[in-house]
Image: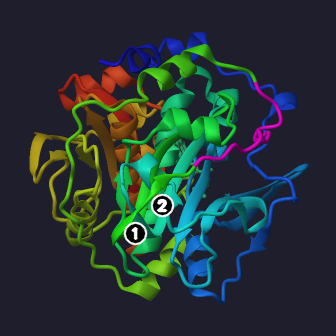
Amino acid sequence: MFWYHEQTKHTYESVRTHPNYLDWESQPSTYKNYPDTYPKRRLDLEKKEDHFLYHIAGLTAKKSYPGVEYYLRTNPSAGALYPNELYFQARGIEEVEDGIYHYEVSTHSITLLAPISAKEGLEPYLGYDVAMQGYLFLASAVYYRSSWKYKNRAFRYCLLDAGHLLGSIEAAALLKPHAVQMRYILDRKKLNLMFGFEKREWFLSGAVMAVPIKDQKVQAIEFSLPFVDASGTFEPNFLIERAYTETMHPIGCKKAIQAPKFTYQTSKLQETIFTRRSQREFKGGAITKGQFHYIIEAITQPVLSDCDEEVSVYAVLNRVLDMPLGIHKDDTFIKYGDFAKEAGYLCLEQYSLAQQGAVTFFLTSKGKNYQALYQKAGIIGHRLYIASLYLGIGCSGIGAYYDDEVNTFVGNDEMVLYALAIGK
Ligand SMILES: Cc1cc2nc3c(=O)[nH]c(=O)nc-3n(C[C@H](O)[C@H](O)[C@H](O)COP(=O)(O)O)c2cc1C
């Protein structure tokens, strides 16, 4: 098991002996804004491409508590800390000038960071030697936004949240419709340097929604962007830095070339993406057997990727009509019984989600490429949100669980990556 994962496990004792005290004075910002000297264009929802981009990472709700106001987005995030930033190259897209952009969430704008030419672009950094017509997305993490709260465990959340962002790209692309391929083999070192990240922000992955332009060879573009403070406050975390550096270069990657198939109706899917929220608690309502199978079908579709890792999906059935209670994996039950309370306990006693829900999920992997396998868990998590909400069923990600006890519960010794619950 990767040492970082081992060292960041929660146990019954650890969460009681190291409770997280938050220093609200040093709360980092969740937005990155380039200076106004860069050309910026506000997204216009009447325009097809802008509409698509907005559905990936736009602000869709505002929450207010006395003294605090914050916005929620199309993509979920552990603790609403949003550690990820989104960049993209657009080439040959109507209404979007060719170039390399940053998606500025706070103002619904895209910032042009660098122009590209027919002979130069980001393609070689993602492993292509010809020009790609369409979008090349890049997801990064400003890790302090998350480590401010989650300390050493934050790298896990940066990866899960990045997976959700990739899942958001996949879901928004279905509106077009267009397939998206995830890329983990990237020249992270060079890209981090060119984008001026200075060890505070790192690229984690790419997502390609583009087709090769035959015979149009491209060179790797070179530029040097200034450092732009993306968190306001910052404290280095050397454990996380080491975990990132050691997982920068994927090894022995296996490509996944089979495209996923989804059966969503476009306008209903669009509404689902736009209104997606996390359920704060479940009331103990059941879902039907048909709904359960529809959801399992959607989340177990292949994920197109240049570095696919196997992620196991365990479903603890608490309330599914006409189905027995128990733990379900790959179309069969591995254990029968009422485990609702135990599922609630395993998720750090979040009983209102994991016990009261209809189904609690645990995702595990014994893969080698940590960044790729963790982000895949986030993508599957995002598919779970979308498929459930599409059917009018609530969903919540659960990043906190007792790692080793989940292993004993599901009967494996893999890395436990993520838990989620769905229900009513
Ligand atoms: C990786 C991840 C882990 C999460 N873990 C929890 C959790 O343990 N408990 C919880 O109540 N919500 C959890 N959430 C839900 C977030 O709190 C929620 O996404 C965030 O507040 C934004 O709200 P929204 O999803 O409604 O837009 C998690 C979300 C993600 C993506």
Going by the numbered disc 2, the residue's amino acid type is Leu
User: Which of the pair 275/12 is nearer the observer?
Assistant: 275
Label 1 belongs to which residue?
210
Seen in the picture, residue 419 relative to 106 is either above or below; the reply is above
User: What residue is at 41 percent from the left and 85 percent from the top?
Assistant: 266
Between the C-alphas of marks 1 and 2, the distance is: 7 Å
Instruction: Report helix, strand or loop for mark 1.
Output: strand
**Around disc 2, counting alpha carbons within 10 Å, would you say few (fewer than 14), some (14 to 19), or many (20 or more)?**
many
Question: Can residue 363 be seen here?
Answer: yes
The residue positioned 69% from the left and 30% from the top of the image is 198
Q: Which of marks 1 and 2 is nearer the N terminus?
A: 2
Residue type at mark 1 is Ala
> Which portion, as a residue range, is magenta?
222-234
The percent position of residue 171, horizontal first and vertical second, equals: 43, 68
Look at the numbered discs 1 and 2 and tell me whether their residues touch, using CB distance below 8 Å. yes
Give left or right: position of 8 versus 327: right
Whether the magenta-drawn stretch holds residue 119 is answered as no
* Whole-percent x, y for residue 104 in the image: 72, 60
- Residue that sits furthest to the right in the current view: 67
Query: In the visual, does 151 lie left or right of 361?
Result: right
Q: Tell me where residue 187 appears, x and y as whole percent.
A: 46, 38
Magenta portion: prevailing SS class: loop
Which residue carries the number 2 mark? 136
Question: Residue placed at 53% from the left, 57% from the top?
Answer: 279
Q: What element carries label 2?
A: strand
Quarter that holds the N terminus: top left
Q: Can you give x and y, in whole percent of width and height, for residue 408 in the image?
A: 24, 23
Quadrant of residue 36 within the rendered picture: bottom right
Name above or below for residue 266 compared with residue 424.
below
